[in-house]
């Protein structure tokens, strides 16, 4: 299926590994000129080499810690300068952050910034550009909310989902779509430490109808569809890729 993405441009955060890296690769396969950013220069360079080795356009690499105070402005400025215009913004950066019920403040401050505030500021830096062009697609990666213990990232990502819904309501008149993509248990470095040894198999067989964790490519496939013109009538949604693991109907 042609997703009509050839010649488009995209900015992907958290692209140095895992889901972000897989999304950047899949966009490049579809003919998108990709601007990738993350903290690790070497990982970004490796990603660029892999994309080029597949015969696709070399991405623009921009190493930047999203938690740095001026990072959203720096990323937005660099991406616009390099790409000329941005068609697609994918806010992927984030990291699981379990906390105790009465623990220190630092993990809360850091995780709320990484998983909500910085993506919000980056998006806001680019909204005048999208509005002026009367087009654009924003995809925000969220996380599983159905947890039994405190995790700051899940709380921040829940805020991300509500913010995205409200943005979609206001930006549709400008031709701008805003959606969220929620992963279930995807086989990444972020998840593996929580399921050592045989725990992954046991959990999957008990809790996931498709009997295993997902792969980063599963997320990339859905992400690229959602930002494509094929999804032109989809906005304000949270799409879930979890093998059927979510128990609620809504």
Image (cartoon, rainbow, N blue to C red):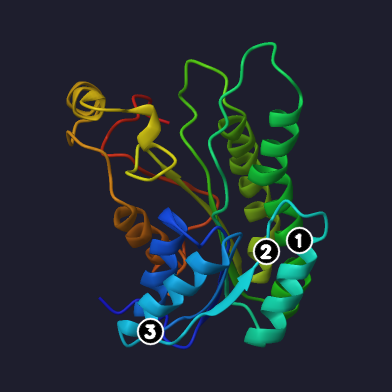
Give the x, y percent position of residue 61: 57, 76
Is label 2 or label 1 in front? 2
Residue closer to the observer: 172 or 30? 30
**Residue most toward the front?**
42
Labels 3 and 1: the sequence-earlier one: 3
Query: In this picture, is 33 found above or below 160?
Result: below
Identify the element where label 1 is drawn: helix
Residue position marked by numbered label 2 in the rendering: 64
Please indicate, yes or no, whether residue 89 appears anywhere in the rendered image.
no
| Rendered residue at 55%/51% (across/down) | 236
Which residue: 61% across, 46% down? 165
Label 3: few (<14), some or many (≥20) within 10 Å? some
Provide the secondary structure element on which disc 3 rests: helix
Relative depth, front residue between 217 and 136: 217
State the CA–CA distance, disc 3 to disc 1.
Answer: 27 Å
- Quadrant for the C terminus in the image: top left
User: What is the CA distance from the residue labelled 2 to the residue labelled 1?
Assistant: 7 Å
In front of the other: 234 or 19? 19
Q: Nearer the viewer, residue 135 or 22?
A: 22
In this figure, which residue is indicated by the disc labeled 3? Answer: 52
Residue beneath the point at 67% across and 66% down: 173
Among numbered discs 2 and 3, the one appearing first in the sequence: 3
- Mark 1 surroundings: few (<14), some (14-19) or many (≥20) residues within 10 A: some
Q: Are marks 2 and 1 in contact (CB under 8 Å)?
A: yes
Is tag 2's residue or tag 1's residue first in the polypeptide sequence? Answer: 2
């Amino acid at each position: 299926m042609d997703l009509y993405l050839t010649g488009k441009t995209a900015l992907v955060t958290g692209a140095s590994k895992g889901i972000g890296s897989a999304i950047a690769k899949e966009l490049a396969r579809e003919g998108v000129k990709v601007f990738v950013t993350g903290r690790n220069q070497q990982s970004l360079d490796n990603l660029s080499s892999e994309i080029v080795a597949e015969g696709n356009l070399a991405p623009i690499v921009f190493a930047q810690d999203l938690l740095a105070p001026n990072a959203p402005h720096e990323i937005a400025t660099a991406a616009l300068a390099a790409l000329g215009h941005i068609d697609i913004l994918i806010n992927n950066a984030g990291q699981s952050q379990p906390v105790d019920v009465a623990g220190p403040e630092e993990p809360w401050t850091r995780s709320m910034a990484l998983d909500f505030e910085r993506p919000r500021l980056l998006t806001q830096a680019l909204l005048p550009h999208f509005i002026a062009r009367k087009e654009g697609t924003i995809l925000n990666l969220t996380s599983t909310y159905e947890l039994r213990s405190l995790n700051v990232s899940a709380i921040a990502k829940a805020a991300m989902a509500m913010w995205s819904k409200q943005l979609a309501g206001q930006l549709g008149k400008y031709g701008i779509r805003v959606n969220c993509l929620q992963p279930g248990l995807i086989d990444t470095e972020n998840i593996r430490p929580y399921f050592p040894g045989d725990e992954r198999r046991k959990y999957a067989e008990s809790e996931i109808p498709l009997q295993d964790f997902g792969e980063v490519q599963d997320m990339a496939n859905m992400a690229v569809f959602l930002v494509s013109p094929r999804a032109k009538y989809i906005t304000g949604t949270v799409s879930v890729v979890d093998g059927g693991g979510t128990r609620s109907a809504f």
